[in-house]
Structure formats: structure tokens, C-alpha cells
Image (cartoon, rainbow, N blue to C red):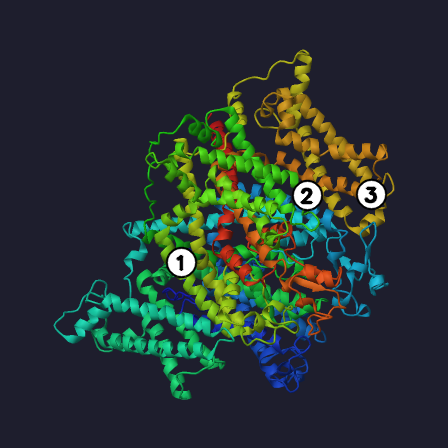
Amino acid sequence: MAPSEATPLLGGAAAAPAPATWRDGVYAFLEAKTPGGAIYEIFTILLILLNVFAFILGSLFVEKYNDAAWAQRDGGMCGDVCDALWFGNYDGNALAFLNLGSTSVLEIVTVLVFTVDYLLRVYLADLESDLFKGFWGRLRYLPTFYSIVDLASTVPFYVDSFLLRNTNLVASQFLRMFRLFRMMRVEGRYDTALTMFDDVFYNQKDILGTALFVGVTTWLTVSSLYYLVEHRSTDMIYCGWAPDYCGDADEIDVSLCTIDYWGLTDCSAAGCPPSDDHPEPCFNLYRSIPMASYYSLLNLFGEFPLIDNHGVGGKIVGTITAIVAVAIFALPASIIGNGFEDIIYARHEKQLAENGGEPLAQQVAGGRMTEGFAAPESNRRGRWYNFLFPMTSPGSKTVDNIINILIVGTALTFMIDTVSDLSSFVHIGMDVFEFLAVIVFTAEYAARWWTCKEDPKYAGVGGRIKWMFTFLSIVDLLTVVPYWLEVISTGTIVTPYGDTGTFAVLVKSLRLLRILRFERYTRAFTTFDDVISENIDILAVTGFSAVILWIFLGAILYFTERNNRDSEMAANYKTVPDSMWMTLLNLTGESPLAQYSIWGKIITGMLGLMATGLFGIPIGVLGAGFEMLVSDQVDDTPDEEEEEGENVNPDTKLEQVCYQFVNGIGSVAAKWFEIGIYVLIMVSVAVGIWQTVEGQEGTFVLVEWFAVIVFTVEYLVRFVGVPADPEWDDKGNWFVCRLRFIFSFYSIVDLLAILPFYMAAAFPGSWIDNYDEMFRMLRLLRLIKLDKYFPSITLIDDVIRLKRDSLKIAGFAALTLWIIFAGLMYLTENKDTGNEIDNVPLYGCDTDCTMADRFQNFFDSIVYTGVALTGDYPITTYSWPGKFVNFFMVIAAVGVVSVPSGLVASGFMEIVANKSKARRGEAVNVTGDDWYEHRLAELKNVDPPASPFGPRMDKWQISVNEFLNGRADGTWTTFAFCSRVFIFAVIILNVVAVLVESIPEIDRAVGNQHGNFFDRFEAFSVTWFALEYILRLFCAPKNKEALYSSLVYATTFFGIVDFLSTAPWFIQQALIAFGWMDSDSDTAKIFRIFRIFRMLQLEDFVVAFSKLDNVFRASKEVLKATGLLALIIWVGCAALFFLFEENNPNWRACDQSIPLSSDDTDAPGCYDFNSTYECNEFYPGLCAQAAFTNVPNALYYTAVFLGGEWGVIDFSWPGRLVCLFLCVAGIALYAIPIGILFDSFGVVLGMAEDEDEEEDDDEEGQ
């Protein structure tokens, strides 16, 4: 059978012809082509799995890394005999008499089996392929994939046992994990698991290289910027690897440390001086560009583990990274992801064609019962059946609605019951309600059980038992049986207090399962089952590969990080299960930890670049398949829009003039006024943001006065012109139309943005001043005024109506999973007092706080669960049951819960695109062609103009152009080609020089004297780059790509990059020559770092960034609306976070001399003040707020949140509501413009490749 994606992972062996010789028989046995071979294959699989589980569990009993009492060798759960049987952690266990070192019975048996298996396979290799015949053929077999896997699975044992028996080789222990890859032999075809990946890379090969260039360039640029702004920041000094003589690393005051000119850190003043063994015990995390590159890489993954440590410059770079750079860097992964989506879509379309065009979801019988069946009304059971199932009897739907209300009510009573300090009256009321509801549910279940035999599906013998094992029947049973068991065991029904027992809380939590009853109406989870059935082959292969990758990488990081000098890092990798938990988060794109060892950084970096894509495929398949099948089941069609009628108001000339003027119609002055309003809105919003910074409250007052006056005039003019506006047409009644306008959305926004200013000016010192910050934030509403010109917010209603049917199904599935997982997380973490967290005084815990303080009730849990379901894990210190729940959240729920927000985002793009087309009366141009493309096309058969300086100049220009840009037929002379390679090498060496020079030790070794190595290399490079730039300007009149113009070349992307590659050096030399800058100053270092941008000169070899103009043009129509929406969400949510969180004591830190809390009114504690301002009033300069101190600071955090990374999470309840909004819809809506931009980027790059291919085809045709 040929390899294919559809080959089942554990398919049975195909019938094989009888073996001709004993060698053929043995080979057939090894390949599982005989009954005995099939049994041996199963035995091998079980043996591998047993080895893997033994390795994972064995790491729990290494007492060096796990100090738990049960893990100790003496007196623990697994002594010497247990270790000898299964784990082999110690060489002195019960097998010590064999003198084989640390081993186990399981290891010995496994190695013997695999050794015999391998020797037989080598002997029979010629039967697998003629390439492996003879002695030399067997040698060719040795380096094959499976041969290497087999050797790695066995050879380390022999090395440990016979060659190096007195050593404990960690590497050899790890190599045994290669036995996992023997699982690939189950089908005997490693290619089967990689078929999809090969297809994706093949289909996307044309633009993947370009995208990788974009990603690497972005990475190095961001790394360089972070290095510039953070390499002298004491907040970025890290002492986690400091030696013991420095004391507790957390107690070292890094503000006392100094950083010298070279970038080396000295913390002698903080009690951690350098020594011969530790020349730099504490160091800056951004001390060099190579070091900065790792943390920049995490940021480009969308992760900000150092979010609180950045200075102002770092926060600016971080904001830019979160808004733009993350999307650019994600372009390669997006291309691969789109490739998988294309394959899934193609498979889906193929299945539709095979099913006669009918979606699979509609072919599966819906519900538990026979679709459309109604029982005869001749008997009582039939009448009750019709009442309960098809609900055709009178009153049946009313009863069904009552039961639905009871379901929602009992779910709410569980949620409310988890809140502490409820009165006894409330508890009694909820218990009575629960008792009555359970009686109804029990009666309903009994009636359904009794009547189900009327249905043909369950009419036979054992029909009721068959019905009881249907999904919804099990759910119904689980929601009533535990309740009656508890009542019987406790003898109580109503209590005046909340339940605290684990079983009682578990019983009550089962109420949440009743929500699944609504599956009868939506069939959302039936759809999910269809997705699994439809994509079972992809899920089997990719899921199997993902699990192997997860275990394998978890094992690697266990070995690299369990001895990490940072105790926090080591604690997270002390066992393989701990390592697998953190690796699971890494594979989903999370990086909650950052201080890895060198090998750990390399592995997690590679893991983020490649492995997350592989691991995310099964999750993505589930999510994409769910959305696709939901779309098949419903037909989303936009509501018909009412056409605007003509205005019949008898408006005056003044009203018409006012209306046209404020809407930019009819005159140049009106258009400029409209543009001025745009600019003034942005300026006034920026001023409002700046005025939230401490000490800047009174700046730009005149600008604010001017803006308010202009907006007031605009409002009055718009008010006068209302009767001429068709939107407010009211059949000639000018009073009614103006009244409607006053209470309209835009009018209220305008009034809220200007009235508070006048109120504060008219009543100084009044109650208005107490709410000054809130009123200031109302000014930011002016952003919404732009919605008049670029509709965005007002389109959300259209989007919901467009996608309402799909949203019902997807929303139910997402909400159900959210509620159920929130309940599970509450159950697992409410009693978790073992995992410590930072102080959360807002939640009632000042010291020694644990996870139980976060998960005090269900409503707390629903916030943290909502964040986790977006795919982000700001919290990692869960209990093991909590980690188990989170595993299923990662595997299943994340993909499904993201579907509703994805539907809203896709609907928004569809609405905006349709409105743009309707407004223009034509299809939106997606090619991005602009004046350059048109001009270039016009010059296709046009010869270059003659030079005014004569034929000799023409000849020189043509020669130089052919030297630099190649001949017209695309060929190069040998000298020109070598010169091109030389320039390429110089560019790469310049990038390397920037990276190397930033390393403090190398920089100090080279010295900073004038004329050092780096200075000479820079002068050499600039000479070549400047010469090349001049020559390109010289030959541009003969270069068609420059439109035969030196000016065009100088102003194109290539010309600007070439200019910027040399200009900073000349500017630097001029500043040094005039004495305005020292050659060894930090300012000079900035100029040297600018050399990193020479990497953009590689654009001459790989076309990418020069297409950005085309990209913007291709997406400008949708970008206007979606960009405004993203801006409103960003600024609006930042303003709300600032208002709600600026005084949150969870973010407050005080000097050690101040108690955290105190009952002494003369010496109150840090957390006793209502605001950080009050704290500083009492303790001047000793209190600080870590986050949301002003709107610019809140903008930084919100930008990170909108990227899907929750760097801080312990909000107040108003802040939690903003957080939940971002989780449900805000993140998806915010990401639309960036997604559109880089979808267009991929399209434009793809078209460029297509054009090149077409040209090649034309040439071949000629």
C-alpha cells in the first residue's frame, strides 16, 4: 500500500504472500506482515511506551532534584528494588551485583529485544532495498533514519555498562528517548507523517524564503533597538546566577550596581563584587545584541516575560514590536499556516464533491433520537414521547422552556454559592431552588427513560440501556445521581451555609453540565464530532507527531535546565512531568520563563520558530474544521440595507451650506476643514494622553482650548445643517430632526468630549475636580468622531447580523466550554495553598499568598480561564489537577473558543470590503499596482535616452549598469558576478561586525582607540557602499528599473537604503570633526548600530520590503476602517485600564521600611492607602506603582495585551471586565488591520513570483 495521509496509524497488517525462504519469513515477521509479526509489533509498541512512562516517572524519584519525602531513596515510595525493576536512577540499587552501573530490569530487557531486532534488520536489509545488498550495502543502511534511531536506543546502554561503567552519562540517558521515534515503525513509513508538511513547504516555497528574510531582518532590527535603549538600564540587571557569597539573589539591590563604558556590570556596592571565578556575577540582560536577540525573539513570538522591567525607551520599542513587528515576524509561520488551511480546505471541498455537494455535518443524523419521528398517539407512552422529544404536544415547549430556565438558574446558583460571606438566607434559598430543580430533572429523566422505547432506534431488547449511554443521557444522569447520593449520605437538603467539602462542591459543580442540554438546539458539539471524523487521518498523524515532539523536547529541557543556576528555573524543570508542563506551554507559543541556560535558550528559540507550528496543527485543524462545518450548516447572508431616500426637508440655503461644509462637500475650504478636524482629533487625543503623565497635567492647555472651541463650532454648524442631512430627514419637521440628532450616537460622543471642559472651567474647585481624570478620559472619545468619516464601530452591528447564525452555534460551544473549564479550574485551584504567588492585597491577601487567593470563587475563575482560553498563560504555578485541566484546554478548547471571535473578524472584513466596493462602484484593486508599475510597463520596449554628454558617456553608463545590474538577458560577466558576491559578503560581515562589537568583552579587547579594527572595517565598508551608490546614481539613466532616472532611483526603496547605509558614517565623522560628539560616546555607538540596517541592502538579492508600498495600496480600503477600529480599541481600553488600575494595590510596591499593612493609623501600611498618591503623601517618594501609572504606560501594557500576551493579570473587577472584553472580541478585532496588511504582503510577494514565472515561461516560449 502506497504511503498516504489517509493511512491509519494503527491499521492492521495487510495480507501477505507466503514467504519463500526463512529470511523472507523473518523479514515479514519484523514488518508485521504475519499474525505473529502483528503481535510482536504490538509488544514493541507497549515496550516503547513502558520505557517512556518509566523514564518520565523515574525522574520523580531522583532525590537530588526532588526533595519531597515520597521521592527519597530511603523511606520513600520507590526504594532500591523498585529502582532496579523500573527506573535505574542509582548504580547502587538491587542490580549493583551486575556491575553495569545505573540500570534496571526494564532497561536490560528492552536493550536485548531492540539489539536482536536491529541485528536482524541489518542482516535482512537487502530485502528492504537492493541498495543495501552486500557489505557496502549494509554500510549504506547504517546512516538511514531508522538505523540511527535503533542505534541511539541501544548503544548508550553498552557504553554506560561496559566502556564507562563508573560514570553517569546524562547524554546517554537522554539518547534513550530516541526510542520514541521507533513508534514511526508502526506503519513502517516515516514519510507518511511528513506528507502534509512536504506538500505545504512545496506549495509555499516561492515566497517562504522572502518571508524568512523579512523575519530575520525584523528580528535583528528589534534586537538592535532593544540593545540601544536597555544596555545601560539597571532595571535589566539580572543576579539569578550570582554565586553564594552574594546572598539571596532576590535581595540584591540592583539600583546600586553600575555599568561601565564597555557594558560590564559591577554590583560591589550591592554586596555582590566580582571575583576571579565570577568576573561578572550580575549582568545586564541586554548587554549585547546577541543576548538581546533571545529576549527580542520572545517578544516577536508575542511573549513579554520582562514586561515590568523595561524603561521608557524599552516600552516604546516594546509597543512598536507588539503592534507591528510581531505580525511581520509571524509572516513565515502565517504562510505555513495558510498552506495547511489550503490543504484542509481542498480536502473539505473534495469530500463535499464526493458527498454530492451536501456538507458532511448535514449527512450525520442529528440529535439522539430518530429525526422527524413522532410516536402514535394511541397509547399513553406515545403521547408522553411526543411531549418530551419532538415536542408536538400542547404545552410541551412551555415545559421545555421552564426546564431551560431551571438549568440556567441552577448554574447561576453554583456560581453564586462559591462567593464567600453570603447570608444564611441566600444559602437556604439556593438550596431550596436546587432541590426543586433536581426533582424536576429527575422526573424528566425518568420520563425520557420510560418513553424512549417508542423510538425505532431504541425499540428492541436493551433499547433503554442503549439510550442511557447516549451523550446527553449521560449528562442528565450525572447532574442528578450525585445530588441524591449526597442527600442520602448526609441526610441534609437545606443548609444555612456554603458547602466546603470537596465532594459537596463537586456535586454542585456538576450542575454546570446541564448547560450541555442546549446541544439539542444548536448541535454545536455534534459538529465538533464531525470535525474529528472528517479530519481523523490528519489528526492521527499530526497529533501523534505533536505528542512525540512534546515528550522529546520536554526530556531535552529536563536535562538542560534541572541544574540551572536560577533556582526558579530549576524548580520548573526538576522532573520530566514538570518539564513537560512548561514545554506544553512553549509549544502553544507561550514563554512564561526567560532565564534559560545557553542550551535552553537555543532549544526554546528553535522550539518557538518551528515546533509551535507543528504542535499547533492538530489544534488548528479542530478550530478551522469547526468553523468550516458551522459555515456549511448555516448560510450567513447580510440583511438588506435600506436605501437612503432623498431629503424632502425644505432646508434653507444656510442649512445646506452648513451641512456640506462640515461633511467636506462642495468646496476646497470644506475639504480642508474636514482634514483639519482629522488632525485636530489626533492632536487633542495625544494631548489628553500626555496630560495623564505626572507633572504634565497643565501642559498644552492652549491646544486643548483651541480644540474644544473648534469642536464646539463644528458641533453647532453640524446642528444648524441637520435638516439638510438625509440621515435625519423627518418629512420637513426641523424640530424633530434636530431633536433626533441631539440624542444620536455621534452627538452624544461630541457632547461628552466637550461639555466636561466647559463645566470644569465654569465651576473651578467644585465636585468636578474630584473626577478630573475621568473627565479627561472622556476627551479620548473624540477618536470615535472619526467613525463619521471611516465607519468602523457602527459596522459591528452589521457584522453580528451577518454572522448571527454561525455565532449562535460557535458562541454556544465557546461559552459552554468556558463555563465548564472555569468550574473545573475553580475545583482544582480553590484549595491550592501550596503554590505561592505575589501579594494580592486587593483580594484580601497581604503576605504568603497562594493560588487559592486567586481562585476564591467561580467568578474569579472565569476571568483566569477566559485568558487561558485565548492561548495565553500568565499563570503557570497550577496544582497537578489544574495542569491536567489546562492540558485539555490547550488541546481542545482553545481552537473552538477562538471561533466566535474569528467569525466576527471575518465578518467585519467582509462588511468593510463590500461597502468599499459599493461606494466605489467597482471591485477593490488587490494587486497594489501604483504609478511605478504603470511607468515600468510603459517602458517595456523603450530604449534608454541618450546622454547629453555624448556617446562615450552612454557607453560608460551602459557598462556600469550591466556590471551592477546584469545584462538585459539576465546573465552576468564573471567579474560582475564576483563583485556581486563580494558586496553580499561585505553586507553580511557588516551585520556580524555590529553583533560582535556589541559584546562587552570583545569591544574592550579591541579597544576604542581611533583606528581600531572595527573603525578600519567600517571605513573599508563605507568606501565600497559609497562607491556603489555613486555608480548606481551614475548608471540610473540606463537602468529600466530606475525608470531611466537618477532621481527616481534615489527616491525608491533601493536608493534610500543605499543612501542610509553610508550617510550615518559621514554624519558621525562630521560631528566628531566639529567637536560636537566624542568618538567613544554612547551617541557614537548609536551611529555604529545603524549599520545593522545595511541588512536591508540584501533587498537587491531578495525582493520583500520594496513591495511595502504595494501592500499598503492593496489593503488601503479595508485598513481605513479596521485601523480606526483597532486604534479605538487600543486607546479606549488603555484609558479604561488607567482609570480602573492606576491605584490597584496589587501593582503597588513600597520601601522595605514601610509595613505592608498595619492597624496603627499613625503608621499605616503600604496597602492601606486608597491610592499610591496618598501613600507618597504620607511616605514621600517611598511608594511606587508598577503598572498603569498613566495612559502612555497603559498604552504599552494594552498593546502587549492586544497581542495576546497578558503580562499582568490580577486586575480589579472593572479591569477584569475590560480584560474579558479583550479576550472575547477585542484581540480579534484589533488584529484585523495587521492581518489584512500582511495577507496583502503575502499576496503581493506571491504575485511578484508569479510574474517572474510568467516572464520565464514567455522567454522559454520564444
Crowding near the residue tagged with mark 2, few <14, some 14–19, many ≥20 C-alpha atoms within 10 Å: few
Query: Residue 915, position in %: x, y?
Result: 40, 38
Callout 3 amino acid: Ser
The quadrant the N terminus occupies is bottom left
The mark that comes first in sequence, 2 or 3, is 2
Which residue carries the number 2 mark? Answer: 699
In which image quadrant can residue 910 be found? top left
Mark 2 or mark 1, whichever is nearer to me: 2
Mark 1 or mark 3, whichever is nearer to me: 1
Q: How many marks?
A: 3
* SS under mark 3: loop
How far apart are the two marked residues, 1 and 3, measured between alpha carbons? 58 Å
Q: Residue at x 40, y 41 (%)?
A: 739
- Residue 569 visible somewhere in the drawing: no
Q: Is residue 291 left or right of residue 906?
A: right
Q: Which mark is residue 1081?
A: 3
Q: Which mark is residue 765?
A: none
Callout 2 amino acid: Thr
How far apart are the two marked residues, 2 and 1, measured between alpha carbons? 47 Å
Above or below: residue 730 compared with residue 554: above
Q: Is residue 1031 left or right of residue 175?
A: right
Callout 1 amino acid: Gly
Which residue carries the number 1 mark? Answer: 811
Query: Residue 918, position in %: x, y?
Result: 38, 34
